[in-house]
Structures are given as C-alpha cells and as structure tokens.
Image (cartoon, helix red, strand yellow):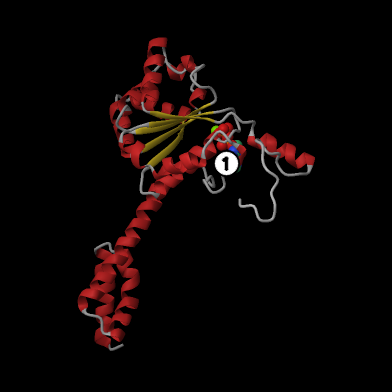
Amino acid sequence: MTSKANVDAARVELLLGDLRLPGIKLMWAKLAEQSDKEGWPAARFLAALAEHEMVDRGRRRMERHLAEARLPAGKTLATFDFDSVPMISKAQVAALASGDEWLAKGANILLFGPPGGGKSHLSSALGLALIENGRRVFFARTTDLVQRLQIARRELALESAIAKLDRYDLLILDDLAYVTKDQAETSVLFELIAARYERRSMLITANQPFGEWGKIFPDQAMTLAAIDRLVHHATILEMNVESYRRREALDRKRGRGRPATHATIKKTETSED
Ligand code: ADP
Ligand code: MG
C-alpha cells in the first residue's frame, strides 16, 4: 500500500467510527480489496457495504432485545420435550412463535399447570422465538414486576411505568398466583392488565386456572374484571402433567428412559420420528 493509501485508510477508519458505522468499519478494507481486484463498479462496492451494515444492525438489535428481555437462560423450543406434554400441540406453539396474528391485536396466552410442568420453560422458549422473529419481549416473575410497579405508584409514576412496558410486544408474567395479599391491595396488576387490554399482549402462567385468583386482586369485582379482559382474546394452554423434574428423577432411579405419557406404537427401524 502507498503511504497516500495508508493515510486514506486511517481517515476512513476514523470517519466510520464517528459516523457509528461499525459494520462497515469492520468490513470495508476486505471489500475494498476485493472490489479493486475484481474491478467492481463503485455502486456495487457501496451496495455491498450498505448491505453489510444493515445485516450487522439487525443482529445487534436482536442482541439488545435478547438482553432486555431477561429470559431465563437455556430454555428453547428445541430443548422442550413436547412428547411429555401431549395436551400441548407443537404445531400450535410453532404458530404462536411466529407471532404474526395474535400480537397485532394484543391477544394473550394463559398457561396453566402444576409446578415443574414446564410453564416457565415453554413461555421463555416462546419469548425467545418471538425475539428471533423481530419482536420485543419482557419476562418477569409477577411478584417482581408488581413490586416495581408499586414503587412507581408511590412515586406517582405508575402511569409512565406502565406506558414504558408498551415497547414490548409481549409481557410474560410468570407465576401470577405467587402475588401476595399485600401486593394485591395496591391493584397495580389490574391497572397493568387494563392498560394493555386489546393493545399489547401478555403471556401469564399460573398453577391454578382462576380458582385462586381472588387473592391476587383487592376485591371480587376487580378479579372478575381482570379475568374478563385477560380471557377475551386468549389462547389457553393447560399443562396438566406431573412435574418434569420429578419424572426425570424417577426415571433415573428406575434406570431407564421416561415412560411414555400416552400410548405409542413400538418403533421399528424404518418408522419415522
Ligand atoms: P414450571 O414453571 O411449570 O414450574 P419449569 O418450566 O420451571 O416448570 O420446569 C421445571 C424444569 O423442568 C426446568 O428445568 C425445565 O427446563 C424442565 N422441563 C419441564 N418441562 C419440560 C419439557 N417438556 N421438556 C424439557 N424440559 C422440561
Ligand atoms: Mg415456573
């Protein structure tokens, strides 16, 4: 390289840094070399750079969305064993993971089942799939989020705290039933549900379908009003299975694979999976 080319290269690096174009900054030298060698028209070189920056930004955006979502680590649809929850349709979950229809109208998902049944895993995996499809998601233990909103209410900032959550296409509230009586009394959870109604989606997990929801809200009228809004546009999934952890432990003890939870045909060499 001539010294003039060296000076140009140093300038380009500086300018790209100032312009905040890290994707181009990383790639331009290699592409410029290829372009020179192959005699690209200038427009082709520029298009290649712009495309590179575009892809890079998309990747970084997704990384940001993943970090802000606070999903429990390592829970994916790929590692979720659908065979052990025969009442959940894999095809239905895959359709929900595309996110297209239900998020646009602010519809909800309610996920019920006993502890250890896979509610947190499935909701987190769904959240991850939605982020990969370009959506924004926030995962929270319900009691943690309620606590945050209570603090906001004390500071007279509840409305803006709820409005800030609007940026998320999907709010996952894990373990709704663990809200305590004193948390219920401030009714911040009701205000959140009412504010998102028919606009922004929620995925709520709970051990009990509605039975114990009386203690989550200050009075019965509010409980009914909350349930009414949540179920109006909702997909309800019930995972009535035994604890996955318990079954795994039992299987280990017995020294064999997990027993089938539903009738299966004995597999032959040629049968498809
Ligand atoms: P819940 O939230 O319903 O109490 P979790 O989702 O926390 O249950 O599941 C308990 C543990 O068992 C987690 O480590 C989870 O990854 C695992 N698990 C539960 N169900 C499944 C499943 N169907 N396939 C794979 N792992 C599962
Ligand atoms: Mg859980």
| Residue 71 in view, yes or no | no
| Local secondary structure at mark 1 | helix
Q: Which of 33 and 223 is in front in this view?
A: 223
**Could you tell whether 273 is left or right of 108 in the image?**
right
Quadrant hosting residue 260: top right
Residue name at image x 29 percent, y 79 percent? 32
> Which residue does the image show at 30% across and 29% down from the upper left?
198
Q: Label 1 sits on what residue type? A: Phe
List the single residue furthest toward the bottom.
2
> In the image, is residue 95 above or below residue 185?
below
Closer-to-camera residue (221/32): 221
- Image quadrant of ligand 2 equals top right
Position of 156 with respect to 255 (left or right) is left
Return the residue at label 1: 82
Counting from the top left corner in percent of width and height, residue 78 is at 54, 49
Label 1 CB less than 8 angstroms from ligand 1: yes
Q: Nearer the viewer, residue 88 or 111?
A: 88
In the rendered image of this protein, does residue 145 appear above or below residue 6?
above
Q: Outermost residue, right direction?
A: 254
* Mark 1 crowdedness (10 Å alpha carbons): few <14, some 14-19, many ≥20: some
Q: In which quarter of the image is the N terminus?
A: bottom left
Relative side of 212 to 57, left or right: right
**Picture residue at 32% right of the left edge, 29% below the top:** 196
Residue 220 seen anywhere in this rendered image of the structure: yes
The residue at 39%/24% (across/down) is 230
Q: Position of residue 82 (x, y in %)?
A: 57, 41
Q: Where is residue 111 in the image (x, y as percent from the top left)?
A: 49, 30
Quadrant position of residue 166? top left
Residue 58 in the image, given as x and y percentages of width and height: 34, 56
